[in-house]
């Protein structure tokens, strides 16, 4: 026995040190892995923290108490006309905005009208429409503050404005509450009245169109490819194009939609119809792939049994395979729809970028969607819009996460092992 | 009276329901009278009638609603009021669409004075063509329904007919994917060719100056290299430096070390990163990451650090791609046979030696494929770069500088107010074509690698 082949001395100092070193490397490596997981988790937490931190305040707004005395400053309006369709116009023409500005100056000192939002008189207008008796009395209205005052009240500000806000606060004239116009209005240039309802409705219409087109098409295509398609060059071509489409950058779909739907077919630009069609083309491959997996997992014995008792191939699929595969198909569809709901880039190209101050009326009227609203607001330097943007992001994330959670719930509930 | 496609679709759907009921009733009646058994169950006869009623009319509706606007415009152009329209161009189109909007009632009054005399001709023409369309559609529906109705006999093979039509629908649905692909290729190619008539392809691919919005004295220049470099810098370099190590280590930890319950919870949590909309990432990058990086750069003493930096966009994009890389790596590590891992451990290697020297080399082709797919996704990403990377075409390796990418320029070129035939607008399609080809190639190569590797162990 010579020394080279001697059994290793496991107890020797050199070997012990080596083993210790290897174990230390093992621990380091494991920690590195844990660190990577924690890093991604930390990033997610940081992202959510920043958004919630900025956005939570966007749901709130500061109001200033302004007494308006219509006895001292009468607004001459024929009460009968308040029920008319053009009541808004009538009140505006009667000079309500001047009266409100004057009342604000009187109540809050010089330049008091600058402390309330320039659209504040519209709140008074809707109050008057609801209760015409207000026109003969003195009422204290809680009017939305101007954007600067709102920020100063929430964060504290220095200088003249800060002093003014502090003084108002001491007098108890400021109040903060949930900002309902944020949920009820469409986009506006004034952060005090800008809201997400128009974008939300646009999103719902767009996704509805996308679902209406992508879901049946995707499921039928998946059924064909999985159940009936012969193996030949044509079906190969279909499969290859579906897989490629799933990986095509979304902005390419925007270019397609611009060239085909808008410039060729002349469909209504910037509308939920065109947006929905674009997103439908984008989501269809995702739905096909998910549906094929769901259909594939239905065991062949079920098909054989149905065929065995005399069902036709179409009956086998529509009476047996499809109902069993449906939970899986729906899971994939919800996830695809959630992705489409958060998509912005292709919609930029079909013109949904424009400023839309109205809630969309139908599928062909110009509208915007929630992610686009976030994008447009992110360009506004006004500090009031930073909060609004984050608040809109919170709404979007809540919608998307609940869609995904629902998909996971569906998958867990209906997951079958055959 | 305008041509409301949705209402008409509902109308023929209603007719189809009546057809279904009638077909079902008649088949029952005939069977009872002849004392025979039906070949198909009554609802299949109903479906047969309903489909014959619905399909031709719906098809006509689709064709008519895409053809009739052109017909209406043609008729308006022959009227006297249209004689003094400006000849071709943007203004003419604006006047026509203004008049159309008023005539269809979607707009209360004309915005352009020149459109006013055209409103009545437009309304008349739309009404005329709407009536023609509705009459033809109803005639088609009734003819189809009657034809199907008269064919109902007890021994009529309604079920196989209906099933044939169902199969046709299935086939048509799967053809949509091919149509979309062709649509993409043709529209990109068609517009790109128009662009290349104005600007040579070599300039786009190899030119080093990108200035499509230059003023009138200098001509526009469309050299794409700065865009391609910016795209590579952000998508293929910075994003990957973030995503690959974190994604790989995450996959290794989750597959090899983490307890099953930890894995069950952490994986979907990471998937959230992939589910966050890109516009949110863009906002986050522009508002939080970029200013922080700028301060960091200023602290390091880097002059003229921009708030719009390649680094901010790249880092955030890398984070977005982490779950993508980690799930691809997860798959390929899991695909390595357990015997190889057991063998290495049995020889006395520690888990990390096994992972680094056995599992990762064996999984490498799959991981590479996954990385290529991630790169393809990163270079196609739009919103993050539009919001955080800036729009100035710089050829710089400085990650703190502002760079621009292909996707950001496509958005920029197409969101201004421009006529559709200018070289600037067409350039967006040429860039789109380049992007499409590059991502397609990356995807094909990546899938080849993944597929080839998978076969090696089976």
Image: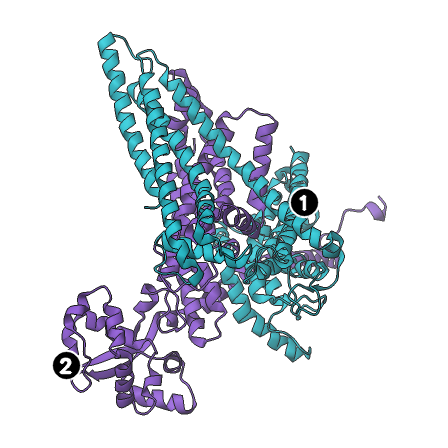
- Which of the image's four quarters has the N terminus of chain A? top right
Q: Seen from this angle, which residue lies furthest front? A: B80
- Residue A137's disc is 2
Q: Colour of chain B?
A: cyan
Q: Residue at x 43, y 67 (%)?
A: A390
Q: Colour of chain A?
A: purple
Q: CA distance from mark 2 to mark 1?
A: 74 Å
Q: Residues within 10 Å of mark 2 (few under 14, many from 20)?
A: few
Whether residue A367 is visible to the viewer of this picture, yes or no, is: no
Residue A90 placement, left or right of B213: left
Q: Quadrant of residue A298?
A: top left
**Element on which disc 2 rests:** loop
- Give the residue number, with chain letter if any, for mark 1: B441
The spot of residue B129 in percent (x, y) is 39, 41
Q: Quadrant of residue B314?
A: bottom right
- Which of the image's four quarters has the C terminus of chain A? top left
Q: Residue at x 74, y 56 (%)?
A: B203
Q: Residue at x 18, y 87 (%)?
A: A72
Q: Residues within 10 Å of mark 1 (few under 14, many from 20)?
A: some
The spot of residue B385 in percent (x, y) is 59, 62
Indicate whether A127 appears above or below B267. below
- Same chain under badges 2 and 1? The reply is no
User: Which chain's residue wears label 2?
Assistant: A
Q: How is the image coloured?
A: by chain
């Amino acid at each position: 026995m010579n020394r080279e082949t001697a059994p290793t001395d496991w107890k020797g100092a050199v070997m012990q040190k080596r083993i210790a070193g290897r174990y230390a490397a093992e621990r380091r490596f494991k920690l590195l892995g844990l660190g990577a997981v924690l890093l991604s988790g930390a990033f997610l937490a940081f992202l959510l923290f920043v958004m919630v931190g900025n956005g939570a305040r966007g749901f709130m707004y500061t109001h200033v108490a302004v007494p308006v005395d219509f006895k001292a400053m009468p607004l001459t309006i024929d009460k009968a006309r308040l029920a008319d369709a053009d009541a808004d116009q009538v009140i505006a023409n009667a000079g309500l905005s001047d009266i409100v500005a004057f009342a604000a100056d009187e109540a809050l000192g010089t330049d008091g009208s600058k402390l309330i939002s320039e659209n504040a008189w519209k709140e008074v207008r809707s109050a008057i429409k609801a209760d015409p008796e207000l026109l003969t009395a003195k009422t204290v209205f809680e009017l939305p503050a101007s954007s600067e005052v709102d920020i100063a009240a929430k964060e504290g500000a220095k200088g003249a404005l800060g002093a003014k806000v502090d003084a108002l606060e001491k007098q108890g004239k400021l109040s903060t509450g949930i900002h309902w116009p944020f949920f009820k209005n469409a986009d506006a240039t004034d952060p005090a009245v800008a809201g997400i309802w128009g974008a939300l409705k646009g999103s719902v219409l767009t996704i509805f169109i996308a679902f209406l087109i992508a879901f049946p098409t995707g499921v039928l295509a998946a059924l064909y490819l999985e159940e009936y398609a012969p193996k030949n060059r044509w079906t190969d071509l279909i499969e290859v194009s579906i897989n490629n489409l799933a990986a095509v950058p979304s902005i390419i779909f925007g270019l397609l939609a611009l060239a085909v739907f808008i410039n060729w077919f002349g469909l209504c630009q910037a509308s939920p119809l065109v947006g929905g069609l674009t997103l439908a083309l984008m989501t269809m491959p995702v739905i096909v792939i998910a549906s094929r997996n769901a259909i594939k997992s239905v065991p062949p014995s079920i098909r054989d049994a149905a065929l065995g008792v005399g069902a036709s191939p179409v009956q086998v699929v529509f009476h047996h395979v499809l109902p069993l595969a449906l939970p899986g198909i729906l899971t994939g569809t919800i996830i695809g729809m959630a992705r489409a709901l958060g998509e912005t880039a292709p919609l930029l190209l079909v013109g949904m970028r424009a400023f839309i101050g109205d809630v969309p009326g139908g599928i062909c009227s110009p509208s915007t969607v929630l992610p686009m609203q976030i994008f447009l607001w992110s360009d506004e330097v006004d500090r009031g819009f930073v909060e609004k943007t984050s608040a809109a992001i919170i709404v979007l994330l809540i919608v998307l996460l609940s869609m995904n959670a629902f998909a996971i719930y569906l998958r867990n509930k209906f997951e079958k092992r055959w | 009276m305008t041509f409301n496609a949705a209402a008409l679709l509902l109308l023929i759907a209603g007719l189809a329901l009546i057809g279904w009921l009638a077909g079902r009733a008649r088949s029952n009646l005939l069977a009872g009278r002849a004392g025979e058994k039906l070949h198909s169950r009554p609802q299949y006869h109903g479906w047969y009638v309903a489909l014959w009623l619905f399909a031709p009319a719906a098809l006509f509706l689709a064709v008519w609603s895409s053809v009739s606007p052109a017909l209406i415009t043609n008729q308006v152009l022959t009227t006297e009021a249209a004689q003094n329209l400006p000849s071709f161009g943007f203004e003419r189109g604006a006047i026509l669409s203004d008049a159309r909007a008023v005539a269809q009632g979607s707009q209360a009054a004309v915005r352009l004075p020149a459109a006013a005399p055209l409103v009545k001709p437009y309304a008349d023409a739309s009404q005329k063509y709407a009536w023609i369309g509705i009459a033809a559609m109803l005639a088609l529906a009734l003819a189809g329904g009657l034809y199907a109705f008269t064919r109902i006999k007890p021994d009529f093979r309604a079920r196989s007919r209906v099933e044939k039509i169902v199969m046709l629908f299935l086939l048509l649905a799967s053809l949509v994917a091919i149509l979309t692909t062709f649509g993409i290729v043709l529209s990109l190619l068609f517009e790109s060719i128009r662009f290349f008539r104005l600007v040579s392809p070599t300039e786009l691919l190899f030119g080093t100056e990108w200035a499509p919005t230059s003023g009138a004295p200098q001509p526009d220049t469309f050299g794409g290299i700065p865009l391609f470099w910016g795209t590579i810098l952000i998508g293929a370099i910075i994003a990957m430096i973030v995503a690959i190590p974190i994604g790989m280590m995450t996959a290794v930890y989750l597959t090899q070390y983490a307890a099953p319950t930890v894995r069950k919870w952490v994986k979907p949590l990471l998937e959230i990163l992939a589910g966050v909309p890109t516009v949110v990432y863009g906002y986050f990058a522009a508002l939080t990451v970029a200013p922080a990086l700028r301060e960091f750069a200023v602290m390091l003493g880097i002059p003229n650090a921009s708030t719009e930096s390649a680094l901010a966009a790249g880092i955030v994009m890398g984070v977005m791609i982490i779950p993508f890389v980690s799930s691809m790596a997860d798959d390929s590590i899991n695909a390595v046979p357990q015997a190889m891992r057991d063998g290495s451990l049995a020889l006395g290697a520690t888990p990390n030696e096994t992972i680094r020297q056995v599992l990762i080399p064996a999984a490498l082709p799959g991981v590479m494929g996954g990385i290529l797919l991630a790169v393809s996704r990163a270079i196609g990403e739009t919103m993050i770069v539009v919001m955080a990377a800036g729009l100035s075409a710089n050829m710089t390796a400085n990650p703190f500088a502002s760079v621009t990418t292909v996707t950001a320029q496509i958005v920029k070129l197409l969101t201004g107010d421009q006529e559709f035939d200018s070289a600037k607008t067409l350039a967006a399609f040429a860039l789109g074509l380049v992007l499409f080809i590059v991502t397609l190639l990356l995807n094909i190569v990546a899938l080849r690698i993944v597929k080839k590797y998978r076969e090696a162990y089976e």
